[in-house]
């Protein structure tokens, strides 16, 4: 990204405009709000709690709202998430009592300490789906979040560098958003958002710490240093690191600047970080920035993930990350009880997901009382809101013809042109014809 164009979205969190795609990175209703609504709240924490290690793949990480919102949610709900009752059928306990994945089974009212469980059958509500006549045993979990691992994927190193400093909760966002044109401002501020989600400061400290330890070269990038020290951008980036101001006008990285950043960290945020990290119980948290093309990365990656966040630009502008072949590769990276979450509800995207082998469902947005976005999994039981008959039928129309990228190397323009040709030559109904027929 040659030049950033920041603005504040309608929940007061920082957003960015990409001139190459002529599009915004974040929803006008609120960058941070969207992260919670579409990538955090829909996650199946009951299933995640079964794992000693929670592995997340954050595709198109950007300035990191999805990852930071996830960590912030854990912190905000730590008392509920660390110790939870789990109800298990007695015959399951009897048949699996010697299973090496189960340390101890407890049926009393005192939760044991320092025990973790990896059990296939889990419910946090005793009456959720059990037969009333079944016998139920109770076990407890603790220290589930001792280890969280995030692989953050983006092809823009600058965004990683800016991520820990992005402001949220700004009150005068319309006044401060003067860098981009008035035309774009009118577009962005049509929808007002009274919801003000936030990210605790120490979450940013943790990300900053991990980047310094594992990818220090990011803060040797002259453009990252220039942006963080430029007065023009000061309203958009947190002032908790005011020491950046001494580098005003930097055009080339200074040899001692990396040690200077370390001094900032250990002098000003170590105590806050340690206190919060101990409270959060993620001392072993791993954050791995991967500066690479997403397609080439997932071809090489041999890991399995419990959660995949797909937050790429719209399919019409970046189809290479929404093709059938891309989803087929992601299918192989997802755990059997994992979930992939995305904001897109496009018919051609859902069709590609279905053809790749995923079970598909809606994300239910409680705030707006509507379906918004898409959730997919390998396990149908994880889909709370399966697609309706209407939307399943829509996948079989011309609108559902998906993008193809057989070798995961094609240019976006070529992918778009190939799909347009396939749509023109298709004998399938158009979406308009299908809707009319369905309504009759």
Image: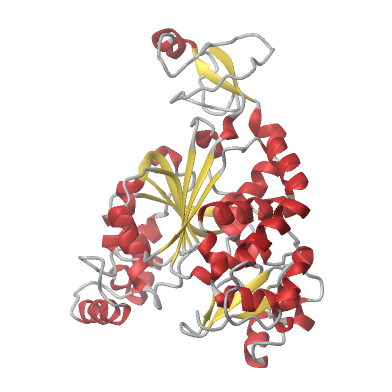
Residue lying at 56% horizontally and 83% vertically, measured from the top left: 3
323 left or right, relative to 217:
left
In percent of the image, x 54 and y 27: which residue is there? 123
Q: Nearer the viewer, residue 114 or 228?
A: 228
Residue 75 image position (x, y, % from top left): 69, 42
Q: Position of residue 52 (x, y in %)?
A: 50, 30
Instruction: Report whether 194 appears left or right of 365.
Output: right
Q: Position of residue 434 (x, y in %)?
A: 33, 70
Note whether residue 62 is visible: no
Quadrant of res 100: top left
The answer to whether 288 is drawn above or below residue 87 in the figure is below
Quarter of image, res 28:
bottom right
Picture layout, residue 140 above or below residue 51: above
Relative to 39, is 410 above or below? Answer: below
- Horizontally, residue 175 falls left or right of residue 112, namely right
Which residue is situated farthest in the right direction here? 171
Return the x and y of residue 35 as percentages of the image width and height: 60, 59
Name which residue lies at 57% across and 78% down. Answer: 223
Quick check: 362 above or below 395?
above
Q: Quadrant of the C terminus?
A: bottom left
Pick the residue in front: 45 or 429: 45
Q: Residue furthest bottom?
A: 182
**In this picture, residue 431 sits left or right of residue 363:** left
């Amino acid at each position: 990204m040659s030049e950033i164009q920041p603005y504040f979205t309608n929940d007061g969190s920082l957003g960015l405009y990409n001139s190459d795609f002529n599009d915004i990175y974040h929803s006008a209703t609120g960058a941070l709000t969207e992260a919670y609504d579409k990538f955090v709240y829909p996650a199946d924490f009951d299933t995640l709690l079964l794992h000693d290690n929670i592995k997340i793949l954050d595709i198109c990480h950007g300035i990191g709202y999805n990852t930071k919102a996830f960590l912030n949610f854990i912190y905000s709900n730590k008392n509920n998430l660390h110790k939870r009752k789990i109800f298990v059928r007695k015959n399951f306990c009897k048949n699996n009592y010697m299973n090496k994945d189960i340390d101890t089974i407890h049926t009393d009212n005192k939760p044991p300490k320092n025990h973790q469980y990896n059990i296939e059958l889990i419910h946090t509500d005793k009456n959720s789906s059990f037969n009333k006549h079944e016998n139920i045993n109770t076990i407890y979990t603790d220290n589930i979040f001792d280890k969280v691992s995030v692989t953050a994927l983006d092809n823009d190193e600058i965004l990683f560098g800016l991520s820990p400093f992005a402001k949220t909760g700004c009150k005068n966002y319309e006044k401060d958003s003067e860098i981009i044109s008035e035309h774009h401002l009118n577009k962005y501020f049509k929808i007002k958002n009274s919801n003000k989600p936030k990210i605790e400061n120490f979450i940013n400290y943790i990300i900053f710490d991990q980047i310094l330890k594992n990818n220090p070269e990011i803060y040797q990038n002259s453009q990252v240093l220039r942006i963080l020290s430029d007065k023009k951008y000061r309203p958009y980036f947190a002032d908790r690191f005011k020491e950046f101001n001494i580098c005003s006008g930097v055009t080339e990285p200074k040899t001692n600047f990396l040690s200077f950043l370390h001094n900032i960290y250990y002098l000003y945020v170590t105590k806050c970080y340690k206190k919060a990290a101990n409270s959060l119980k993620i001392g072993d948290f791993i954050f791995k920035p991967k500066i690479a093309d997403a397609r080439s990365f997932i071809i090489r990656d041999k890991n399995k993930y419990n959660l995949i966040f797909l937050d790429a630009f719209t399919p019409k502008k970046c189809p290479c990350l929404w093709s059938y072949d891309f989803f087929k590769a992601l299918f192989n990276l997802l755990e059997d009880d994992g979930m992939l979450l995305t904001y897109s509800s496009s018919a051609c995207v859902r069709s590609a997901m279905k053809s790749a082998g995923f079970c598909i469902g809606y994300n239910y947005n409680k705030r707006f009382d509507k379906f918004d976005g898409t959730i997919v999994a390998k396990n149908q039981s994880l889909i709370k809101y399966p697609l309706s008959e209407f939307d399943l039928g829509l996948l079989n129309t011309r609108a559902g013809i998906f993008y193809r990228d057989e070798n995961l190397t094609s240019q976006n323009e070529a992918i778009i042109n190939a799909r347009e040709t396939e749509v023109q030559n298709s004998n399938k109904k158009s979406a308009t014809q299908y809707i009319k027929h369905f309504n009759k």
